[in-house]
Amino acid sequence: MEARPKDISLVVRVEQLHPRVCYAMDTVLGDFLGLWPQLIVWDDVAGLAQAAAAGLPIFNYCTQPSTDFPNLPCNGLLYEDIIRQANEQIDWFGAVSLQLQTTDTIASIFYHITQYALLRPAARLVLDAHGRYPDGDGALVVHGMLEQLTQLLAQQLPAGIQPRPFDFEITIDVDQPWKYLHKPWHVRWGGLLRDLLRGGDAGARWRSLRTGVDPFAVLSLVREICPIAHTKVFFLVGGDHPNDSRFDISMPAYARYAVAYKEAGFELGIHPSYASVDDSAILPAQKAALEAVVGPVCISRQHYLRYRTPATFRSLIAAGITRDYTLCRNQGPGAITGVALPYRWFDLQRNEATALTLVPAMVMDRCLQQYMALDPDQAWAQIAKTIALTKAVGGKFVIILHNETFSDTGEWRGWQVVIRQMLQLLQA
């Protein structure tokens, strides 16, 4: 056994150093629980003796239970190279004995965060109108498993396990930088005529065209109320699909707009366009276009939350993205993979841990306003409830907002108060 790091917390006896086992132990014990695991193959007698002499707690994670060490239930799933067929029932119980009839918690967490179910051969996935995966119920099931695991491990750890501190991030998608300005002249004046004829807000449009002040240009407000260290801004910089924006980063006004956010101190990310999920050439081209304006970019979120696993995540890695913020439910609040914590993406088909960090969001403004049809007061109650649930499990609360949500106009009237209340609660 190699010399252990000073902060190593425990040793886990394993059947082999399989990539899935190594990733799961590092992620579950290390990233989620704040422990530093050292894995030792079961027949490394010298390594186990050295660990015991150092006074390190040793746990057994093998399909055969041990009489010498405390057992972590193991059903063998993490020692497999395959992805099991969709019609095959997975036995979640560990080694068969009266003492070990409990679920293999570590394998179950791995199953959730790798989205194993989406990749099972012959899986019947019902995609929505935008080609998005099923949402699930958003329950924080992984956190329940982590609590069970904490109770099991803590019995053998002298210092116990320290609770995770609560954290949060505000993420803002800029899909439409302006409501009225910087559109072709016939669109600007045609919109004004349409408002006059159909009872639209012609007054607001005319004031914007006359003064050059647009309600969606909210940088000053964002800078005032959003803590820079906890805020990320993602720019949709092009795209030809009807669900994309008419604004392109090649427009001088849009380039200046993005630079202004950069100069304000916010970290900027790419918001790959609607069709990027189907064409791998789009992401690198759009990322390069944004970087030509604002400099290096390493964070991303897919437009409309459209992605495919593993293809999208592989494309992100190839393009130099290190953190992705796409994972979010679109039909309601909650965690789409059962956990409100960032974690490294594992390429299940290649059995390979990657350096790409996935940062799940717990709620999206559009989900509350459109899909759930909540008014601002109801939306605030739902956000406050979601923050409380995230705090209770020591998670990271991430919300997806849009720049127009800050505008307090149109369908977003009343939402500026919601955002201010949320930020007060998060920083209390």
Image: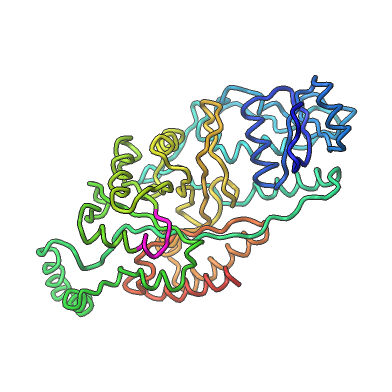
Q: How many marks are shown on the rendered structure?
A: 0
Q: Residue 346, position in %: x, y?
A: 55, 34
Magenta span contains residue 266: yes
Tell me: residue 214, above or below residue 306.
below
Indicate the quadrant where residue 265 lies: bottom left
Magenta span contains residue 263: yes
* Front one among 213 and 252: 252
Q: Residue 11, position in %: x, y?
A: 78, 34
Colouring mode (rainbow / by chain / secondary structure / one colour):
rainbow
Placement of the N terminus among the 4 image quadrants: top right
* Front one among 130 and 164: 164
Q: Residue 299, position in %: x, y?
A: 43, 48
* Residue at horizontal 36 percent and vertical 64 percent from the top: 403
Indicate the quadrant where residue 184 lies: bottom left
Placement of the C terminus among the 4 image quadrants: bottom right
* Residue at horizontal 41 percent and vertical 37 percent from the top: 312
* Residue at horizontal 63 percent and vertical 29 percent from the top: 89
Range shown magenta = 261-268
Indicate the quadrant where residue 307 lies: top left
- Going by the picture, which residue comes out furthest to the left? 186
- Going by the picture, which residue comes out furthest to the top? 43
* Residue at horizontal 57 percent and vertical 71 percent from the top: 425
Query: Is residue 301 rendered to the left or right of residue 142?
Result: left
Tell me: residue 65, above or below residue 376.
above
Q: Residue 332, position in %: x, y?
A: 50, 56
